[in-house]
Image (tube, grey):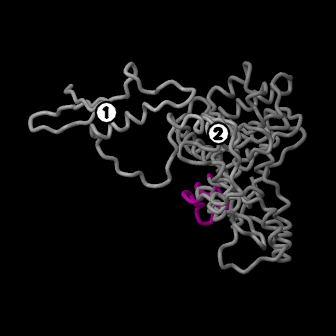
């Protein structure tokens, strides 16, 4: 196993430029590359009051792909932490695993790397290497499934991560034994396998590779996390072999962000975080969606007669009905209504005499057979309330 504290020859001389060039040559699928990724502080957005950056610095900042904590990352981190705690006390069978699925470019690899970095830093903080130790702890392993993977090529990727030599004469069984022994001695607790959708258990080589993953999950004291594109729609986790892999696994879907989840707004929160992490020369942050935009033109437009909409057909018909039948629909008065007084027999008699005047072409409105409506008014009494009904000719009766 390679000592992560050792540097290559090119990184010890030539300053920071040579060091960065030598270190960047190590991919994440090797311990040197993963250790550099996990221990390097992620880039931070500019703070208020900082001097403006140059164009080259801003391009380098945006090309580093700042990680924004999405609901998928939060769910994955919680599930991984829970499964690692539960798996510590499970010795007889395979530990519970995790499957990360979703469409392409949904952030599966980003979520996987972010959770792996968190686990790596948490482990090294709680378990620092002893003074004088030649080898540091290796809590996390990151492996990519190669295209057209066979069982031997996949187990070779596991061996290449820790950097121990593999000869051409070694068989798959020998490599597997060396990987299981080295990973156990190194203290690997989390194994992340990306691009798992490249496996096809329906073929002979794919079936052997699936059997290898099942064997490793039972022999290694680590929690396995698989990530791939829409793996639930592939034959990887179906059938006899797929059921063995997915039997004790928890599914995490990196699908589209919902507009609302309970009292939170995941989509709006992600857009706000992206807005806050931009580093532009003339950047005006958009107002928060929770605050409604204010406008001063709306009241003016409402008070402007020229901006009023023409009446609809229903409104015109209703207006014509009001004009033809004013008795049923009295016109609305814009002035304050005059105070009304209680009718008296003399007033009612005068109103009755006016109503008996016939209009040409119309029958008389009030006849003895069609008396006017009676007016009822309450009269307060010391003992009870009495309703006096006054008819059109001034007679009062008690009801």
Viewer-nearest residue: 145 or 136: 145
In magenta stretch: residue 133? yes
Q: Quadrant of residue 221?
A: top right
Q: Residue at x 87, y 43 (%)?
A: 167
- Relative to residue 227, is residue 124 drawn left or right? left
In the picture shown, does residue 183 fall above or below 204? below
Q: Is residue 181 visible?
A: no
Q: Residue at x 62, y 29 (%)?
A: 248
In the picture shown, does residue 160 fall above or below 200? below
Q: In what element is the residue under mark 2?
A: helix
- Relative to residue 108, is residue 372 drawn left or right? left
Q: Residue at x 71, y 57 (%)?
A: 306
Q: Residues within 10 Å of mark 2 (few under 14, many from 20)?
A: few
Q: In what element is the residue under mark 1?
A: strand
Q: Residue furthest left?
A: 383
Which mark, by number, is residue 211? none
Residue placed under numbered mark 1 in the picture: 375
Q: Residue at x 72, y 81 (%)?
A: 51
The picture places residue 68, in percent across and down from the top left corner, at 68, 56
- Relative to residue 296, is residue 22 drawn left or right? right
Segment colored magenta:
119-137
Q: Quadrant of residue 132?
A: bottom right
Mark 2 and mark 1: Cα distance apart in space: 34 Å
Q: Is residue 22 visible?
A: yes
Q: Residues within 10 Å of mark 1 (few under 14, many from 20)?
A: some
> Which image quarter is the C terminus in?
top left
The picture places residue 392, in percent across and down from the top left corner, at 32, 30
Viewer-nearest residue: 316 or 197: 316
């Amino acid at each position: 196993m390679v000592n992560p504290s050792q540097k290559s020859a090119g990184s010890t001389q030539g300053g920071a430029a040579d060091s960065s060039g030598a270190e960047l040559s190590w991919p994440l699928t090797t311990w040197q590359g993963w250790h550099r990724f996990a221990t390097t502080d992620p880039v931070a957005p500019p703070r208020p009051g900082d001097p403006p950056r140059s164009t080259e610095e801003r391009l380098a900042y945006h090309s580093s792909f700042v990680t924004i904590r999405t609901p998928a990352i939060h769910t994955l981190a919680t599930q991984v932490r829970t499964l690692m705690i539960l798996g510590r006390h499970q010795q007889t069978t395979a530990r519970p695993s995790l499957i990360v699925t979703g469409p392409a470019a949904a952030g599966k690899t980003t979520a996987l790397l972010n959770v792996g970095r968190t686990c790596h830093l948490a482990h090294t903080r709680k378990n620092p290497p002893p003074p004088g130790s030649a080898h540091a702890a290796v809590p996390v392993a990151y492996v990519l499934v190669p295209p057209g993977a066979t069982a031997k090529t996949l187990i070779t990727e596991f061996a290449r991560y820790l950097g121990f030599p593999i000869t051409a004469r070694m068989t798959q069984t020998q490599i597997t034994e060396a990987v299981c022994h080295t990973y156990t001695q190194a203290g690997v607790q989390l194994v992340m396998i990306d691009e798992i959708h490249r496996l096809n258990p329906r073929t002979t080589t794919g079936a052997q590779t699936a059997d290898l993953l099942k064997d490793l999950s039972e022999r290694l004291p680590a929690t396995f996390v698989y990530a791939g594109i829409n793996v639930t729609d592939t034959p990887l986790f179906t059938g006899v072999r797929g059921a063995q892999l997915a039997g004790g696994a928890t599914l995490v879907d990196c699908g589209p962000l919902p507009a609302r989840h309970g009292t939170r707004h995941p989509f709006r929160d992600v857009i706000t975080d992206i807005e806050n992490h931009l580093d532009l020369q003339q950047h005006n942050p958009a107002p928060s969606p929770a605050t409604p935009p204010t406008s001063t033109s709306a009241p003016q437009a409402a008070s402007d007669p020229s901006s009023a909409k023409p009446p609809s057909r229903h409104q015109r018909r209703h207006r014509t009905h009001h004009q033809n039948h004013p008795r049923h629909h009295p016109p609305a008065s814009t002035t304050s209504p005059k105070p009304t007084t209680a009718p008296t027999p003399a007033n009612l008699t005068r109103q009755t005499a006016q109503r008996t005047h016939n209009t040409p072409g119309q029958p008389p409105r009030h006849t003895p057979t069609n008396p006017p409506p009676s007016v009822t008014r309450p009269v307060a009494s010391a003992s009870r309330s009495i309703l006096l009904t006054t008819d059109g000719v001034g007679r009062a009766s008690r009801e």
